Amino acid sequence: MKLIRPIALLLIISAAAFAQTEDLGQNVFYNSEGSIAMAIDAALAVRKLDSPYVMFMLFMAPQVSASLSVRKEDIVMIYKGQEYAMPSLEELRKNYKGAQNDIDLYARLGKESLAQSNMRFFSFNWTYDFYPVLGRGPIASDQLSMAGTIGVKTKIYFKNPGFKKGDELIIKVKDHKNPEYIGACAAVLK
């Protein structure tokens, strides 16, 4: 019985995330259901499906009048019914040498689709990041905070579980102080 409850909850979240997620085009997906609105830019992931680690750009914004904080451990990917945690910064830097190339390629990709969502009403200062590139850009942090009209933008990485074109996944986040504040967004790697 204890195992059935988490599986049932995972299936309900998965179904809700796919039903509520909007495809904004250019491999950008948006979901404002829940306490944390989310946009996932999967444009780089789609171009690097054979990479051992896959990067997504994640935008989060509060949908409640509270200060929310998300730790790296509070973000998971649900792929083919299984939850995947993000790697540590140390693991990524040791096992993956493509982070510099990822951010350079991402900088050249179009991001106009994000402006079609309500995320345009939030400010995304990129001062802190879960996976910063050494010697360049934001500072490493294990926790990112958002409140009011201030959102969060960060790169997130997952070890590639065998992605293929057309695969569907869900990124789920929760506030570390109050796990009832959650957000989930689906993405299709097309």
Image (tube, grey):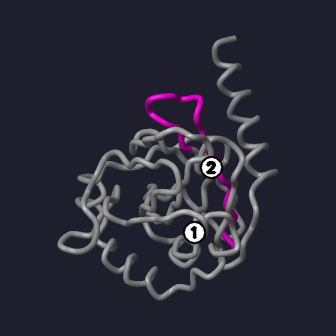
Which label is found at residue 79?
2
Q: Which amino acid type is marked by label 1?
A: Asp
Which label is found at residue 160?
none
Q: Residue visible at 53% across and 60% down?
A: 59
Image quarter hosting the N terminus: top right
Give the spatial CA distance, label 2 vs label 1.
17 Å
Q: Which amino acid type is marked by label 2?
A: Tyr
Callout 1 environment at 10 Å: few (<14), some (14 to 19), or many (20+)?
A: many
Side of 131 relative to 186 (left or right): left
The residue tagged 1 is 41
Side of 183 relative to 99 (left or right): right
List x then y, in percent, for residue 90: 23, 53
The verdict on residue 176 being magenta is yes
Callout 2 environment at 10 Å: few (<14), some (14 to 19), or many (20+)?
A: some
Q: Residue visible at 57% across and 80% down?
A: 111
Q: Specify the segment rendered in magenta.
A: 173-190
Q: Residues at badges 2 and 1 in contact (C-beta under 8 Å)?
A: no
Q: Residue visible at 31% across and 63% down?
A: 127
The verdict on residue 144 being magenta is no
Query: Looking at the image, is mark 2 or mark 1 earlier in the sequence?
Result: 1
- Secondary structure beneath label 1: strand
Q: Residue furthest right?
A: 19
List x then y, in percent, for residue 149: 52, 56
